[in-house]
Amino acid sequence: MSSPGLLVVLASLCLLTPVQPEGQRAHDLMLRYPLIDGHNDFAMQLRKVYSNRLSQLDLHNVSELTTDIRRLRAGHVQAQLFAAYVLCGAQQKDAVRLTLEQVDVLRRMCAEYQELELVTSTQELRDSRSRGSIGCLISVEGGHSMDSSLPTLRMFYQLGVRSMTLTHNCNTPWAESSSKLYDVYKRRNSSLTDFGKAVVEEMNRLGMIVDLSHSSWETASSVLQLSRAPVIFSHSSSYHLCPHHRNVPDWLLHKLRDNRGVIMVNLYSNFITCRDEANISHVADHFDHLRRVIGAQFIGIGGDFEGVGRFPKGLEDVSKYPNLIQELLQRGWKEDDLANVLRGNFMRVFEEVERVRDELSSKPPSEEQVPTELVQNPCRMVLRPPDLRPRSLDHGPTSRAHHGPNLLVALNTALLLSSLLNAS
Ligand SMILES: *[C@@H]1O[C@H](CO)[C@@H](O)[C@H](O)[C@H]1NC(C)=O
Ligand SMILES: *[C@@H]1O[C@H](CO)[C@@H](O)[C@H](O)[C@H]1NC(C)=O
Ligand SMILES: *[C@@H]1O[C@H](CO)[C@@H](O)[C@H](O)[C@H]1NC(C)=O
Ligand SMILES: [Zn+2]
């Protein structure tokens, strides 16, 4: 008990107590308020590098990537919005299948590792925290994933998806992207279309968080006017400090504050300094600016790890978040404000989204459909009973009535025969 070594340690601890170094303070704060991060593209890397074969890697230690369980733990990341993202090139092809595969791989990942847990509500999010596990929230990145279909959106919800960015880098037939990279669905009026409004209303009804990262400012503006629930920018930074179209200008931030939403700061160097190089001071400048413009209650963190290539010095992977908190403490940020930035603000938004869902519980599912001429493409079939008659026998619409039942009889006979054959 009274060994001189212990005394020295105790004495030095006492000396340190009045002015606790910010590094330790950051860790202590994050132990109490572990991070909920807005955006991570791990699932995209799973597809790119491993063809979604989870068995081929150990998620505890994935040295070729910037995210793994070991480093999420070290970074005090308690919950992560994982993006189910598929390339814009899939929009008029198999975007829905690819998205389902990304949702599947995320669900598998979060079930197969005991450190992870799929969460679909604020209650489950809090429970995952008490159990000491990392909560996985699934977020569809890009409205093209739902192929302009509200039933598809509802099925995403059933699978556990709890947020969706309205666009990625491509327009959809109903919302506009901030990027002009893809030459699709160009419109004169770049706000939401009527169907786009139905999407937002359905997301409000379901309890799905609307994510405005990647949307054009006009689209974002119409959503902020329309949405009954607060929204997020899950991975965007300040346009004032780096005028990139993916960032948010001050006038739009004011609307976000009125909506009580959250902007979760993207750490990608090119969105921080608009250059390839950045460091923690540059990132902290974004937090300072956002706090000046809208206040700390409307700020969060959305790292965008695995989605982009270059990260600021000192924030190279998901274990480094405490360095950022340390810098903000050094700049005089209050612990209460940082607690909200780390998780309180996102929790508030998610709780509000659930409350709006409960308020709308008597509203029936929307049967709004996108105008067919807007989504015509060879991969989209309009379902009708198959017409198998040879073309030459086509005598116009009246003949269908005769053939329909005959076709059914033939089908039934075939089914009966095949079941008899199989049974033998
Ligand atoms: C992680 O894996 C790499 C090789 O893939 C290995 O060199 C390293 O030692 C491992 N780290 C830990 C902490 O297990
Ligand atoms: C664009 O469309 C929105 C919603 O339909 C409408 O409110 C707005 O006035 C339109 N803007 C222009 C310039 O036509
Ligand atoms: C970041 O870089 C700037 C110069 O661009 C420099 O003034 C600042 O001290 C650097 N901050 C850190 C933490 O290295
Ligand atoms: Zn993105």
Image: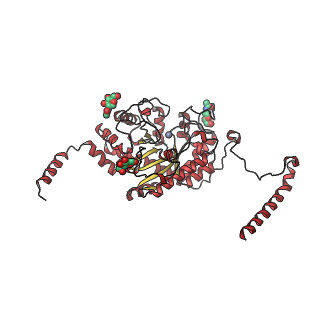
What colour scheme was applied to this rendering of the protein?
A: secondary structure
Viewer-closest of 360 and 280: 280
Q: Where residue 151 appears, x then y in whole percent? A: 63, 51
The quadrant of the picture occupied by the C terminus is bottom right
Dividing the image into 4 quarters, which one contains the N terminus?
A: bottom left
Q: Quadrant of residue 299?
A: top left
Q: Is residue 149 left or right of residue 70?
A: right
Q: How many marks?
A: 0
| Of residues 273 and 73, the one drawn nearer to the viewer in this rendering | 73
Q: Position of residue 267 (x, y in %)?
A: 41, 38
In percent of width and height, residue 24 lies at 27, 46
Please name the residue shown 39% across and 38% down the image.
Answer: 295
**In the figure, is residue 204 to the left or right of 290?**
right
Is any atom of residue 76 visible in this view?
Answer: no
In the rendered image, residue 11, in percent from the top left (x then y), is placed at: 14, 49
Q: Is residue 414 left or right of residue 136?
A: right
Q: Quadrant of ligand 2?
A: top right
Res. 386 in view: yes
Q: In the image, is residue 413 above or below residue 59?
A: below
114 up-or-down from 339: above or below: below
The furthest residue to the bottom: 424
Residue 122 in which image quadrant: bottom left
